[in-house]
Image (cartoon, rainbow, N blue to C red):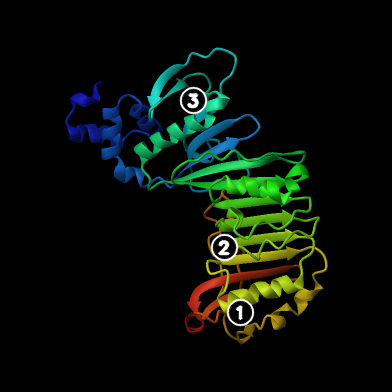
Amino acid sequence: MILSKYPHIVQKEILDHMKHLDLLLLSFVSKNMKKLIMSSQKKRSKSIRSIEYEYDRSDGTCVVYIPKDRKPKNDRPSPKNVESMLMRIVKREEDKHENFQLNVSGKIIDFRFGGEYEYPVVSYLECVKESVIQSIHNHFLDVFGNSVEYYWEGVGWQWPEECFIPFLPKLENVSFCIGMFVDGHFADALNLEKMFSSSPVAKAIQLRVLKEVKLLNPESKFYQAEAIHVNSPGINGPDFLYHFQGKQIGLNCNRYEKSNLIDFVNRWKSGKAFQNLEYGYVRIANDNRFLDTILNEIGAKFIDANRQVPTHAVRQRFSWHDRKCTTFAIPSHAYVVRESDNRVASVMVSIISFIFGVWDKTEEEFFGDG
């Protein structure tokens, strides 16, 4: 069938009933075909929630797919959690595959089909890995548009023995989600700083910290991430809260200074810091008895015990595996108020945790809904 021979309305009808993978494959046929898909499928492309690149540091393989609404945590892409697998990008092997070459965004790239995969496999030499991925991504931007959310999931650990610097290519319109295991030589703050300074600002960062690390530069891109989760169960880590500029932060630590926690709340209340914050928590394993009195020391206000308590919960941003889950609910009678705009934050304290949730409400609006 020669698609170009049909009237435009028929062409669009045919394309409308094709799968995303088939549209992608068809877009490689010619520039005119790519333009036809771009122009006729704009509305449909906007319905794609996201396109995700999942890079495996152990073998240099990157799979590209459209996820289903919910992606099980720590699950590799599979038919159970993938709406449409689009491509696999792999390091070129020594054995001879029957590759053919296509011009993709101005770069000649090796492709192959068949075998165990029903989607195209792109191969690269290590020296041109980043440029190959950039060309593929630019093609996706052309075909599916820049209204789609693109995520790069780069993990820099192989638990528990080794740590790596995550591979984070320079890609337009992409949110980067970084997982790192901080141990050995990477416990040096200078190494961490070099890694973050040479990388795009991340959407989410997950750190597992098992060695002492000094505080990073206050201007570090690390603190500019939208969400940070730090797990340092065996050490007294630095105060990652102090310079945070994003929306959500969570700390699991061995010990935490009471003065740091009081300072965090007071700086938020004054309006001098944490203007973007919507949720934060600190979970303390040891020496956490000061939490019993912390509400009085931060000047918390209290809702009448007989009044229905508003419950704070927002979309959870720490994990990139399930972007529809919410943060731990805060049904607390305690709250604090920001002086600059009268904004309210709910505060909840348990035996080992301090949880802080910022409302998009003034104190008057807060009680109006309560």
Residue situated furthest right in the rendering: 287
Q: Which of marks 3 and 2 is nearer the N terminus?
A: 3
Position of residue 62 relative to residue 68, above or below, is above
**Residue mark closest to the camera, 1 vs 2:** 2
Mark 3 or 1: in front is 3
Is 220 left, or right, of 295 in this rendering? left
Give the quarter of the figure containing the N terminus.
top left
Residue 113 vs residue 202: left or right?
left
Q: Nearer the viewer, mark 3 or mark 2?
A: 2
Residue placed most toward the observer, 280 or 209 = 209
Front-most of 115 and 94? 94
> Which of the two discs, 1 and 2, labels the residue nearer the N terminus?
2
Mark 3 vs mark 1: which is more N-terminal? Answer: 3
Identity, as a three-letter code, of the amino acid under mark 2: Gln
Q: Do the residues labelled 3 and 2 touch (CB within 8 Å)?
A: no
- Local crowd at mark 3 within 10 Å, few (<14), some, or many (≥20)? many
For residue 335, the mark is 1
Which mark, residue 122? 3
Identify the residue under disc 2.
245
Dot 1 alpha-carbon crowd within 10 angstroms: few under 14, some 14 to 19, many 20 or more? many
The amino acid marked with disc number 3 is Val
Label 3, label 1: how far apart the Cα atoms are: 54 Å
Q: Which of 316 and 310 is in front in this view?
A: 316
